[in-house]
Image (cartoon, rainbow, N blue to C red):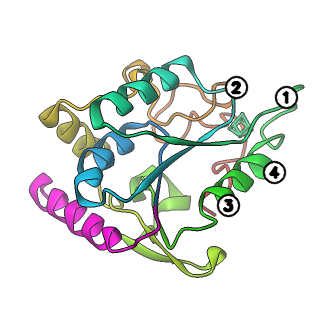
Amino acid sequence: MRSLTSLAASLTETLRQAAAHERLVFLCSFQKEESVILDELLALAPQVRVVTIDSGVLFEQTLATWRAFEQRFGVQIEVEEALATPPWTGPEHCCGAQKVAALERALADADAWITGLRREQGPSRAETELVEVDARRGGIAKYNPLALWTERDLWARIHERDLPYHPLHDQGYESIGCAPCTRPGSGREGRWAGLDKTECGLHV
Ligand code: SF4
């Protein structure tokens, strides 16, 4: 187990490496990971574009956190729409076709991107490295500065720095996506609960 001090140093070092890229994108979903990264990132990489993917069916608490982030961190968050057009027919209705397409648009001109992926989040993320080569996107760099952080580490940092965070985390939602597909649960078990699906496609 690593100390919060060493994890914080690793976060800073990884973000410094990312900051060397001119066309850097941070993908933001307004969860606790984004609270921790944004707090550090903007001073190190003022050129970064912070982008969110809006399905049009986000929780109202997500929209409130969006406003809180912009206010606290002084950043204008860009939007790529991946609208979940009715009638909504289930988890494959929009994740694959729309959300991934929105990510591709967000990264079209990027030479590196940053995510909040952590190994602890589940088997599909257990091999996450701090820095990866994104082979699906022409070999651009993908930085996962929280790869080694645990839930406990994140909350220690959030409380230490009094960071804004998504209020649904306090209601049993450890992972938060779109409203129709997210339930309370630990880890990512509340995402597409009851189905085999564990990823929307952005990180596979
Ligand atoms: S999580 Fe659900 S609502 Fe959101 S894009 Fe995927 S299928 Fe659509």
Q: Are marks 2 and 1 in contact (CB under 8 Å)?
A: yes
Q: Quadrant of the C terminus?
A: bottom right
Q: List x then y, in percent, for residue 99.
A: 71, 48
Q: How far apart in space, not on screen, are marks 3 and 1 (Cα)?
A: 23 Å
Please tell me whether residue 9 belongs to the stretch shown in magenta: yes
* Label 1 packing within 10 angstroms: few (<14), some (14-19), many (20+): few
Q: Relative to 131, say whether 161 is above or below.
A: above
Q: How far apart in space, not on screen, are marks 2 and 1 (Cα)?
A: 9 Å
Q: How far apart in space, not on screen, are marks 4 and 1 (Cα)?
A: 13 Å
- Which region shows up in magenta? 3-24
User: Mark 2 vs mark 4: which is more N-terminal?
Assistant: 4
* Label 3 packing within 10 angstroms: few (<14), some (14-19), many (20+): some
Q: How far apart in space, not on screen, are marks 2 and 3 (Cα)?
A: 23 Å
Q: How far apart in space, not on screen, are marks 4 and 3 (Cα)?
A: 11 Å
Residue at image location 39% in from the left, 21% down from the top:
167
Residue at image location 84% in from the left, 31% down from the top:
85
Q: Could you say which disc has been placed on residue 97 in the image?
A: 4
